[in-house]
Amino acid sequence: MILLQVLESGDLHKLRDLIKLYEDVFEMKDFAMPSDEYLQSLLHKDGITFLVAEKDGEIVGGLTAHDLPSTYFEANEVYVYDLAVAKNHQRTGIGKNLLKELAVICERKGEREFFLQADIDDQDALDFYRSTGGAAENVIHFSYSTRRKVE
């Protein structure tokens, strides 16, 4: 059975396991785990949600979501920064259940919508998000490094 849980301040070990899952699924090279102190501070922050799916004591899926205050209405929008399911548990409904639970959490908090990004070349992710009712928007994401000058 899969259990969904929002991480709380005492769940540092589960947050570390979630990040290890991200590292594996996203194939992050040369990744260095942040310090326990930093991760613990994230667990205490308002406006960030870590939702995990656990099976037999193992984190097999999860997401990280950030509240973004809207300037267009009196509610937050929620940005799903990461969503991952362990490779051997994909296509079993875990990702869909994580999104359903996030929708419940958002509605309970009075937030109007949540959104996420997918790489345009990641056809599996695009198909998954479409199958769960996500509405695709054609945008291009630009990133800026704080280590280089904006021209």
Image (cartoon, helix red, strand yellow):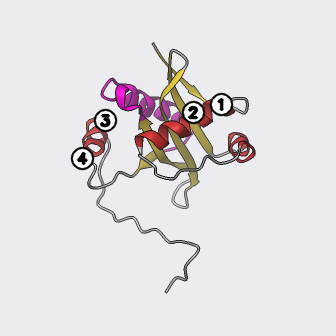
Boundaries of the magenta span: 85-112
Q: Quick check: 134 left or right of 64?
A: left
Query: Which residue, given by chain and number where applicable, does mark 2 sit on?
Result: 17
State the predominant SS element of the stretch in magenta: helix
Reply above or below: 43 against 137.
above
CA distance separating discs 3 and 4: 14 Å
Query: Which residue, given by chain and number where applicable, does mark 1 sit on?
Result: 13
CA distance separating discs 3 and 2: 26 Å
Q: Amino acid at mark 3?
A: Thr
Q: Which mark is residue 123?
A: 4
Q: Amino acid at mark 1?
A: His
Tell me if residue 115 is in the magenta stretch: no
Instruction: State if disc 2 and disc 1 touch (CB < 8 Å).
Output: yes
Q: Quick check: 46 left or right of 22?
A: right
Nearer to me, 101 or 11? 11
> What percent of the width, then of the height, locates residue 99?
42, 34
Earlier along the polypeptide chain: callout 4 or callout 1?
1
Earlier along the polypeptide chain: callout 3 or callout 4?
4
Instruction: State if disc 4 and disc 2 touch (CB < 8 Å).
Output: no
